[in-house]
Image (cartoon, rainbow, N blue to C red):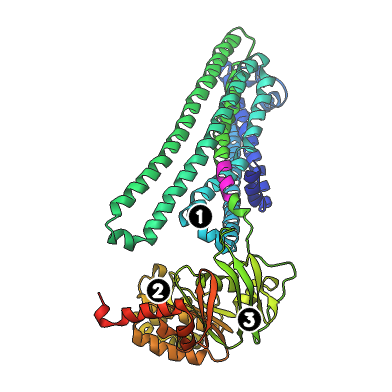
Amino acid sequence: MRNYWRYVAYVWRYKVRVITSVGASLLTEALNFASFAAFAAVIDILLSLRLTGAPGKMAGTGLFRKGIGRQFLRYLEAHSQPDSVLMRTILLLGLALLGLVVLRGIFEFLSVYLLHSAGQLGWTDLAKTLFERITRLSMRFFSKQSLGHTMSTFGADINELRHGGQVIFTHVIRDPFKLLGGVAVAVAISIRLSLITFVAIPFAALIIKYVGDRTRHYTRKRLARRADAMKILAESNQGATIIKAYDAEQYQIRRFNVASDRMLRYGLRQTMIKAIAAPVTDVITWLCRIAVVFYGVHLVLSGDLAFALLMTFVWCVTQVYQPIEKLRDVYTDIQQCRAAADRVFVFMDMVPEVREKPGAIVLARHHRDMEFDHVGFAYEPPKEVLHDFGLTVRAGEVIAIVGENGSGKTTLVSLLLRFYDPTSGAIRIDGTDLRDVTLSSLRRQIGYVPQHVVLFNDTVRHNIAFGDTAYSDEEIESAARMALAHDFIMQMPEGYDTAIGESGGKVSGGQRQRLALARALLRNPRILILDEATSAMDVEAEHRLQKELASFARGRTVFLIAHRFSALRFADRIVVMADGRIEHVGTHDELLAASPTYRRLHLKQHLVAEPEHAI
């Protein structure tokens, strides 16, 4: 139950609402008892008046032959004419009952509204905290965790918790009070009838325990299968182009159907076990009710129990059994929530692999050099993808990095951005180890255009200024002009305020790259990382952009990863990587003479560029 109580703690943040709601619930139940007691008094008095025609003789059930009942009837007898006693009695008691009912309605409203609002506020706080925790996790998490599983946690799992947070305060506190109140009144009326009533309780408890345990098991399985279905849904959305191109719609449909059927299987088992519990419990409680009624009538006929007392006892039996039936469902709900809480708090308990040290310093503005000191890195140790990488880069230098796919180029810049930490060696900027500085001060000095451009379902303006709302319209437009994006933006229906759709689906690949480049340039970074930043552009656009970038790059440290050799024109040095190591470092001419990998890459691109070799 630990994880479930951790969620309840989020609801308990709003304890004033919860406590007030619980208090209102208890008052509601107290007024419920008072209302029925008043109703029983009405029946008793009316029977007295009906049977004798004179209230003072106190015939009838005898429920109020002492105390307030006797005083009330004496008052009526002293101040009323005999023929008007019945009407006055009905009027006064009717008004009292109406007042109790209205007051009960007010407290019931406060109970429901305050509790449900506290539950929603607690659920929202949990969702915000969960999003923050996930957002701050390291890149290794995002490379391993599927989008569908994450979305399932935010959807079904948290909704299960929201329901459970309300349940525990609504019923676990209120219903036991109702049960104890019913037991107390029942015992006061008749111990013999109470013993018959209590026979059902241990049997009901055993059923509740069994159903709850099985429900938790099936809920855990159902939520896991639901996450699998959501994973396929997310993959189908992200890979719609490939699915259609390869005529694989039916294949994906089959995959989703299989996952959905598995989810359904556990859902039906969960439903079945809950459906069995309800009638079994009802049979036991109704057998006890029937026994109470038959034995109670026997006591009334034998003169050992007043009729109104039997009516009150039967009502008390309902007050005892209703909470038991509700607690059966509540226990089941709590077990469902326990399964969901275990899944949610797995994410909550994750610790970022890359995090700031206590007392991390702010990285000063980069101005001197950058050193890769015997850097090694493995995504899955011990298999390294970078081996003993050593390189010193002067501030303001443009470094191009080339190599075959899988040679470690993108991994290198991921370490520079501190998406990961080296497994050996260190990276230093102006002599300061990246592990000693705050992440914000490091990343705010870097402009990054990734190989796979990421845009958001927002306006062009907000995509360029992503992460910072302080930029002016003029600054955004200037960055767009430098990235050669301004002209096509102005041709859009609403210019910079045009929404570009999910993942930038309303713009072409080359346009997406220019928007991503504008985003990087807007930050005016000291370090610029371009990972295949012009791969989707035509040759003419690439040449025009290179001129703009050559001007922008003056005085900045630039890392340029590219397969097109034409993109390496303004590089000061070219680093050739092979199998996670530096093979050679030099200029274009030097590498053609010294680097087999560089010559092979250059020849391959030269052959592709020749018309006679085109397919």
Task: Select label 1 or label 3 by which is in front.
Answer: 3
Furthest-right residue in this view: 359
Q: Nearer the viewer, residue 532 or 164?
A: 532
The residue range painted magenta reads 337-344
Q: Hey, which residue is sitting farthest top in the picture?
A: 302
On residue 150, which mark appears? Answer: 1
- Sort mark 1 into few (<14), some (14-19) or many (20+) by Cα contacts within 10 Å: some
Q: Which residue is rendered at x = 64% and y = 40% of the image?
A: 1
Q: Vertically, is 600 above or below 351?
A: below
Picture coordinates of residue 445, whole percent (x, y): 60, 80
- What element does badge 2 sit on? loop
Mark 2, residue position: 499
N-term mark: 3 or 2: 3
**Three-letter amino acid code at disc 3?**
Met
Q: Main secondary structure of the magenta part?
A: helix
Q: Residue at x 50, y 20 (%)?
A: 283
Nearest to viewer (mark 1 / mark 2): 1
Q: Nearer the viewer, residue 503 or 154?
A: 503
Q: Residue at x 41, y 56 (%)?
A: 234
State the separation of the CA atoms marked 3 and 2: 39 Å
Observer-nearest of 585 and 66: 585
Report how far apart the C-alphas of labels 1 and 3 lie in the structure: 37 Å
Q: Which quarter of the image is occupied by the C terminus? A: bottom left
- Classify 141 as above or below 519: above
Residue at label 3?
370
Of marks 1 and 3, which one's residue comes earlier in the chain?
Answer: 1
